[in-house]
Amino acid sequence: MSNEEQRPDELTCTGADAQGVEIMTPREVPLGGQRAMPVRRTLPQRERSLVGAWCFLDHYGPDDVADSGGMSVAPHPHTGLQTVSWLFEGEIEHRDSAGHHAMVRPGEVNLMTAGRGISHSEVSTTATTTLHGAQLWVALPDEHRHTDPAFEHYAPPERAGDGWRGRVFLGSLLGETSPVATFSPLLGAELVLDPGVILPLEVDPTFEHGVLVDLGSVTVDGVTAKPSDLAYVPPGDGTIAVVAGDEGARVLVLGGTPFEEAIVMWWNFVGRSHEEVVAFRGEWQDQITRDGAVVADSSDVADGRFGVVRGDHLRPIPAPELPNARLKERR
């Protein structure tokens, strides 16, 4: 998924000290598409840009595709990150410049490693009537951020207990471990809770965690979170108490060891300096422009760092203008 803002914030991705559970509320952002499908963005925020290595979280739907126009995100670039796609309803077609062509379906994770550079497109299929899901990014550690582009698909089995069901798509939880490879310790899982269910989650105490509420409401260690809220839990305790509200709940549980590196994140790029991000932007623009204009068809994109998305004929997304000020890296 691309950041479709024409004036994307300059985001200094660092952590913030926390003594207990914080509730992070989203802001609404228009995503590309026939009628600019709205998404609710919880990460990054100025107060907290990272939960472990998770650095970006969009939550969208349920949207009637007949009204919203669905998702139509044309080819766009990424560097220095992994994208994690998770759907609750609908179907999205993924194509990337490393040659991967796959469907994103409910209960199945698609993880794309951008590494040194990739481009991809995401378009909801004609069979989709309702679109509902989350798109997340993971920042790659410096030693791995120039790795080759890659892609993994995994359909985790459902685990169930007294009043709950869950699927673990990254890391380990509920006695289940995902085989999907990551470059830093991570957790990603979906939980569905019946009304009033109390579920103590045994977690890694060195992780920080985020609980994203999709449906219903929950209390997380006694603090209430509503739909699209992200409850942040700092490291230090090996158990997180999740309690469903009267209507039950569906949540995503995310986690990872605190990310110790400062990173410059602008538009779809994760880098380490102003100069690096400026160079990434310039390389993308060079690939997609001819005689000063953006090519009309992705098949006309020139080869380069970000490759060419074969089989896609949408007009590639041009990069926004850089801000007038220097992009900052702060720790």
Image: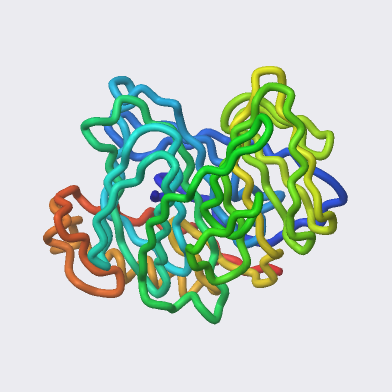
Q: Quadrant of the C terminus?
A: bottom right
Measuring 79% from the left and 58% from the top, which residue is drawn there? 235
Q: Position of residue 144 (x, y in %)?
A: 50, 78
Question: Closer to the camera, 286 or 207?
Answer: 207
Q: How many marks?
A: 0
Vertical comparison of 47 with 29: above or below: below
Measuring 58% from the left and 56% from the top, which residue is drawn there? 55
- The answer to whether residue 286 of the structure is visible from this angle is no
Q: Position of residue 278 (x, y in %)?
A: 43, 69
The answer to which image quadrant residue 293 occupies is bottom left
Q: Position of residue 4 (x, y in %)?
A: 40, 45
In this view, the residue farthest toward the right is 19
Measuring 42% from the left and 72% from the top, which residue is drawn there? 115
Measuring 67% from the left and 47% from the top, which residue is drawn there? 210
Q: Which colouring convention does the figure follow? A: rainbow
- The answer to whether residue 169 of the structure is visible from this angle is yes
Question: Closer to the camera, 183 or 119?
Answer: 183
